[in-house]
Image: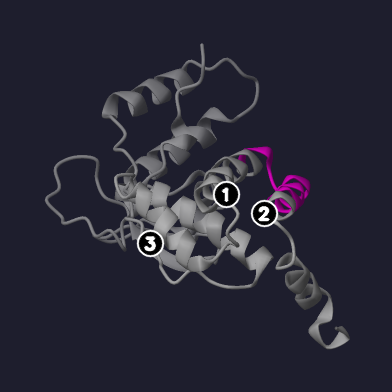
Amino acid sequence: MTLLGEEGTRKLDNRTKTNQQLFPDYYDLVSATLSDKYSYESKRLLEKFRAFIGEYPPTTELAVKFLGQFKDRKPNTRARYAYILSAFFNFYSGQRLPIKIKTPKILPKDVPTEEFEWLENALRGKQTHKKTIERDNPLIQTGRKTGLRAGELGDLKVGDLQLKGDDPTVLCMEGKAKKIEWFPLFPLSGTNRPVSPVKCPAIRASSAWHKRPSP
């Protein structure tokens, strides 16, 4: 048994448990280590899987048949269900599901011009002794012209802006990997330039950073 290691011994022990023992043990582990939301969603789905298999031992083949019931659901939902089942089988036996559900890349919603104007007007009317208005307005304009995320805007320095010449750009350390990218500063109107989803992230601009605050 020592050759199997602690994890191998646990997985071997799992196979001797009944479903009435196995599933609650996994729920306890998830509840102790992950968020309440994930714990609730995981337990909700796995209870359906448990009812589906009855007293039969869990197998990846049965898991695939169980997932087949949700063909009418959206790809993201089915992918989430597959992830929950994969995590359970990793705990139970170390097996992987023989399927992979691809999820479409969903572009964020476009932000109406009126919302930008509302935000700019709110900033101009802001009463403060701090010199934040002079800072915030350029940030809003830069975000509007490039589609950079809030965190990316917050990391910008004046030297990152290259405004000379016919093609002004902004240097950005993009995403969690901090990949260096140069993004064009497109005019807000009067341009027929094609927008590249790679070089101009305006099409993926997150609306979270300029979400209208509650009154």
Amino acid type of the residue tagged 2 in the rendering? Asn
Kindly identify which residue carries mark 2. 19
Q: Residues within 10 Å of mark 1 (few under 14, many from 20)?
A: some
Residue 157 in sight from this viewpoint: no
Say whether disc 2 or disc 3 marks the residue closer to the N-terminus: 2
Note whether 69 is above or below 96 in the view shown.
above
| Cβ atoms under marks 2 and 3 closer than 8 Å | no
Residue position marked by numbered label 1 in the rendering: 50
Is residue 26 covered in magenta? yes
Hey, which quadrant is residue 31 in on the image? top right
| Residue 148 or residue 132, whichever sits in front | 148
Q: What residue do we see at 40% from left, 19% from top?
A: 121
The magenta span reads 23-37
Q: CA distance from mark 1 to mark 3?
A: 22 Å
Q: What's the CA distance linking mark 2 and mark 3?
A: 26 Å
Q: Main secondary structure of the magenta part?
A: helix
Alpha-carbon span between mark 2 and mark 1: 7 Å
Q: Position of residue 103 (x, y in %)?
A: 36, 57
Label 1 element class: helix
Q: Which one is in front in this view, the residue at disc 1 or the one at disc 3? A: 1
In this figure, which residue is indicated by the disc labeled 3?
A: 101
> Where 86 sits versus 206, above or below?
below
